Amino acid sequence: AQSVSQHNHHVILSEAASLELGCNYSYGGTVNLFWYVQYPGQHLQLLLKYFSGDPLVKGIKGFEAEFIKSKFSFNLRKPSVQWSDTAEYFCAVNARNNDMRFGAGTRLTVKP
Amino acid sequence: EAQVTQNPRYLITVTGKKLTVTCSQNMNHEYMSWYRQDPGLGLRQIYYSMNVEVTDKGDVPEGYKVSRKEKRNFPLILESPSPNQTSLYFCASSNDRYYGYTFGSGTRLTVV
């Protein structure tokens, strides 16, 4: 069965710092990859997704992620974080005939 | 507006008192799912439904029931809630789960 690992449990950054959140998955076949964001007290919102094509995908709010197939990774990046990026971030993986699996989440705190 | 609506948003109940959390979507999605979110564990799937009258267990189905009598509704039933079911619950729907979900706003359940 597929699984998803997010290695950073809690990341604390100052405003304008660069962000990279790690996500690794275990599944040998073709997968779709997602990053969701959950702002405090809110539901999950899709940040970006990768289905095929260019492995560097751009999402909303200046986020991007790179799919590296050989490393089974889909890391999320943002060049300069803002206080409003404080949230929890979930990586998710989906394969045909399997349901979506989420990582444990990474809590990002951005200090003003 | 396309959305997944859950009710109630917050619920405090006592052990053993049956409760239902409702979920409704207005996007004519065939696929609906229930997740619970717990700190450090991410989102784990409870039950899913691929269409009317078609439901199946997810990763953590114990203590829960679901039904899908209409396409738009997918209620989650806790027949005898216990404190270990205290959690944040999300309903989600999709046209094709392979391509991601739309999530509801969540229901925070506390069982005392």
Image (spheres, rainbow, N blue to C red):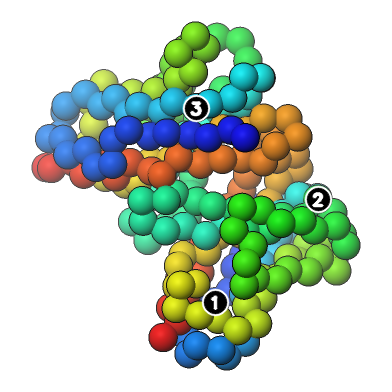
Which label belongs to residue B50? 2
Quadrant in which the C terminus of chain B appears: bottom left
Q: Which residue is mark 3?
A: A25
Secondary structure under the numbered disc 2 in the rendered image: strand
* Chain under numbered label 3: A
Q: Amino acid at mark 2?
A: Met
Query: For the residues tagged 1 and 2, is the chain the same?
Result: yes
Q: Nearer the viewer, mark 1 or mark 2?
A: 2
Q: Amino acid at mark 3?
A: Tyr
The part of the image, by quadrant, that contains residue B81 is: bottom right
Please state if A101 lies on the left or on the right of B72 as rendered. left
Q: Which residue is mark 1?
A: B8
Q: Does the image show residue B3?
A: no
Please state if B93 lies on the left or on the right of A87 as rendered. right
Q: Amino acid at mark 1?
A: Pro
Other residues around mark 2 within 10 Å, as few (<14) / some (14–19) / many (≥20)? many
Question: In the rendering, at what x and y percent does residue B101 appear?
Answer: 63, 44
Quadrant in which the N terminus of chain B appears: bottom right
